[in-house]
Image: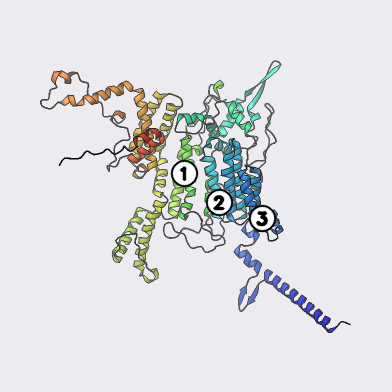
């Protein structure tokens, strides 16, 4: 028989076991159920976790492998994370790129909801690792790996505007704004083309000549490829516009069609949207095959997910932006991919407030967030900025209107014509026109201005100014920057409206300047006009004739075309004050003037010198004191030179002032251009002369 002490110990154990069972049962009920206490409904733990989105599946896609790795650390995750960071740094120092990527992905497994490792390690791969590679296709590979890592982080961390913005910025900056952007843009285009469509074996045909055979370019297949991908073909054949001819000729280009096929051969296994084929077809064996898309998580370019409606508390999606269900064509570039991510990054932001540049209070912190490293108004402007970059790229590459581009040399055997006898011209569809892109840019800036109260009607502006003036007069405010501290609830309705107008105009001026709204919006509006597009196209063709084809008389004729410099001055600059005051436009205008003056002086050198002599002899045509020129000089002296603005001897075509007396090209813009084009000359001109010792004055 058990002793009393043993019986007491047994009773205690049974009691503790019953209490533990009861507490676990109560905890399970509290976790799963809902309790009504003191007339209030108290949600269970699961329901509250769902509402606050703190469950793993609520924050993003669940990485089961990462969850298993975190659980296996058994409280040593901090030490393991520090060790991985140290190993990643050491691997980078030793140029062990595969090990570095492995450490980076391991770090993100251990810290899936800490945003900094995702952004830093993806930036490390896309920037630091890629620049260490010698071949451009290797650089492109690591750029895609870095962006892909960041996209994985976005899938595991929903509603984070900083990650979404970083994906767009890395894409546009590394592909379209780098030193080797000609090849990187071309590789990006290849990523959007199905492998079977760009199979190099497609463009060869084998011709039997007796007992031997030879390979020739299949012009029919080449024609189809050129028509489908005009921007890629032109970029590979002609390159991207550079300031100097030496830089233009030094960049990668495909002079022959065979060079383009070799480029496709060298980059057949490029990261893309499609499952990789094992190897390209042999010449003469190519057959049409069905290509298969990769899973969404493995595709490149990476695009945001498609959704029709926004979550509660979030902004509606941009219906004009790309998404992961959008078909990608030759007209899409990295800027459009970036615009899609910039637009996707706007959704977690709260809606704009009543005042310019302000946001409404965050009502649902679960799905609403503000960017951490950028002012919100600048963050909101990035979709329009990306669209502007697309329009500028089309101008830089020569896509202005529906005239298209004639392919030189590749179809020489057919007389530079396609199989149907039409000229070998590609790119005549509207989606490849800069004019259409600028119209889209204008709409994007207009939507941004209206949503953020930066674009208001003249009547509304006048009404606000009147009420703001009444408020300033009532409160004796001399400086608009000195806003009085007032409580709106203590003001009468009329004064409250006047105070709102005062604050509105103050913020309007501040945020317009901060994001340079007037310049961007007016530039898009002017660049989309017919006269601006024609003038830009003439300047582009004149520079091509002057620098690449050595057809200088044709270049001079282009400059002197009525739709060229004259229209640019009279119809574009003088008609748009904000546009002509933009320093970028002034610098571009001065570059055109420098090229024209240089070309005119070289082609018309004898005429140029004769007119210079006439200018020196002008004072002798009207000598003082008599009217008649002595020695009969007036009888044989040639007449005065014409004061034609096309004559650079009397000043460039864009010298002079506007109707307000302001110069069309400021002195600062001139110096900037000269310093960029002639750095050694401007450096010697701007050197300060040593001060000379003054001789003592005799008083």
State the residue in front, 698 or 308. Answer: 698
Quick one: quadrant of the N terminus? bottom right
Residue 361, x across and y down, in percent: 48, 63
Residue holding disc 2: 164
Q: Residue furthest left?
A: 626
Which of label 2 and label 1 is nearer to you? 2
Q: What residue is rendered at 63% in x and 51% in y?
A: 86
Q: In the image, is residue 224 above or below residue 58?
A: above
Residue holding disc 1: 388
SS type, badge 1: helix
SS type, badge 3: helix
Sequence-earlier tag: 3 or 2: 3
Q: Residue furthest top?
A: 210
Residue 80's tag is 3
Q: CA distance from mark 3 to mark 1?
A: 45 Å
Q: What residue is rendered at 35% in x and 26% in y?
A: 600
């Amino acid at each position: 028989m058990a002793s009393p002490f043993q019986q007491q110990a047994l009773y205690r154990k049974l009691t503790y076991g019953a209490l533990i069972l009861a507490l676990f049962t109560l905890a399970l009920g509290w976790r799963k159920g809902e309790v009504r206490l003191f007339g209030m409904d108290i949600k269970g733990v699961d329901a509250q976790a769902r509402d606050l989105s703190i469950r793993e599946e609520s924050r993003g896609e669940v990485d089961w492998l990462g969850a298993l790795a975190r659980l296996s650390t058994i409280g040593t995750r901090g030490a393991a994370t520090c060790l991985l960071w140290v190993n990643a740094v050491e691997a980078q120092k030793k140029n062990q790129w595969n090990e570095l990527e492995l450490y980076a992905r391991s770090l993100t497994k251990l810290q899936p909801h800490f945003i900094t490792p995702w952004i830093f390690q993806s930036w490390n791969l896309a920037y630091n690792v890629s620049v260490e590679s010698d071949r451009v296709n290797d650089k492109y590979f690591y750029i895609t790996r870095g962006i892909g890592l960041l996209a994985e982080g976005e899938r595991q961390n929903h509603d984070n505007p900083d990650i979404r913005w970083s994906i767009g910025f890395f894409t546009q900056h590394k592909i379209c704004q780098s030193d080797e952007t000609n090849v990187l843009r071309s590789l990006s285009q290849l990523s959007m083309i199905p492998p079977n469509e760009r199979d190099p074996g497609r463009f060869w045909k084998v011709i039997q000549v007796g007992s031997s055979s030879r390979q020739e370019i299949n012009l029919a297949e080449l024609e189809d490829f050129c028509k489908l991908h005009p921007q890629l073909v032109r970029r590979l054949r002609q390159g991207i516009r550079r300031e100097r001819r030496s830089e233009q000729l030094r960049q990668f280009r495909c002079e022959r069609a065979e060079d383009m096929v070799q480029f496709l051969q060298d980059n057949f296994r490029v990261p893309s949207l499609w499952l990789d084929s094992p190897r390209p077809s042999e010449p003469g064996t190519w057959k049409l095959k069905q290509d298969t898309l990769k899973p969404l998580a493995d595709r490149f370019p990476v695009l945001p997910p498609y959704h029709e409606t926004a979550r509660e508390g979030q902004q509606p999606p941009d219906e004009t932006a790309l998404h992961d269900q959008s078909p990608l064509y030759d007209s899409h570039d990295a800027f459009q991919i970036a615009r899609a991510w910039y637009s996707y990054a706007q959704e977690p932001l709260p809606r704009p407030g009543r005042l310019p540049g302000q946001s409404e209070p965050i009502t649902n912190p679960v799905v609403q967030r503000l960017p951490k490293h950028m002012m919100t108004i600048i963050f909101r402007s990035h979709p329009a900025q990306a669209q502007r970059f697309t329009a500028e790229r089309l101008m830089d590459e020569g896509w202005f209107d529906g005239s298209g581009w004639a392919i030189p040399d590749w179809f020489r055997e057919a007389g530079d014509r396609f199989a149907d006898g039409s000229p070998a011209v590609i790119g005549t569809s509207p989606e490849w026109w800069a004019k259409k892109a600028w119209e889209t840019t204008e709409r994007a800036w207009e939507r941004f201005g209206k949503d953020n109260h930066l674009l208001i009607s003249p009547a509304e502006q006048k009404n606000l100014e009147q009420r703001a003036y009444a408020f300033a007069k009532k409160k004796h405010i001399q400086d608009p920057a000195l806003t009085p501290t007032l409580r709106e609830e203590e003001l009468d309705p009329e004064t409250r409206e006047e105070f709102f107008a005062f604050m509105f105009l103050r913020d309007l001026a501040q945020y317009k300047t901060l994001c340079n709204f007037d310049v961007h919006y007016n530039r898009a509006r002017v660049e989309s006009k017919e006269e601006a597009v024609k003038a830009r196209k003439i300047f582009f063709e004149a520079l091509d004739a002057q620098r690449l084809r050595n057809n200088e008389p044709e270049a001079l004729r282009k400059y002197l075309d009525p739709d060229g410099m004259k229209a640019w001055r009279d119809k574009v600059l003088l008609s748009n004050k904000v546009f002509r005051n933009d320093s970028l436009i002034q610098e571009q205008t001065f570059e055109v003037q420098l090229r024209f003056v240089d070309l005119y002086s070289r082609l018309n050198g004898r005429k140029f010198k004769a007119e210079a002599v006439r200018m020196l002899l002008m004072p002798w045509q009207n000598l003082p004191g008599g009217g008649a020129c002595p020695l009969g000089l007036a009888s044989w002296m040639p007449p005065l030179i014409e004061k034609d603005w096309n004559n650079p001897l009397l000043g460039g075509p864009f010298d002079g002032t506007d109707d307000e007396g302001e110069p069309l090209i400021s002195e600062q813009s001139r110096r900037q251009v000269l310093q960029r084009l002639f750095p050694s000359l401007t450096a010697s001109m701007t050197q300060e002369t040593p001060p000379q010792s003054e001789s003592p004055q005799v008083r």
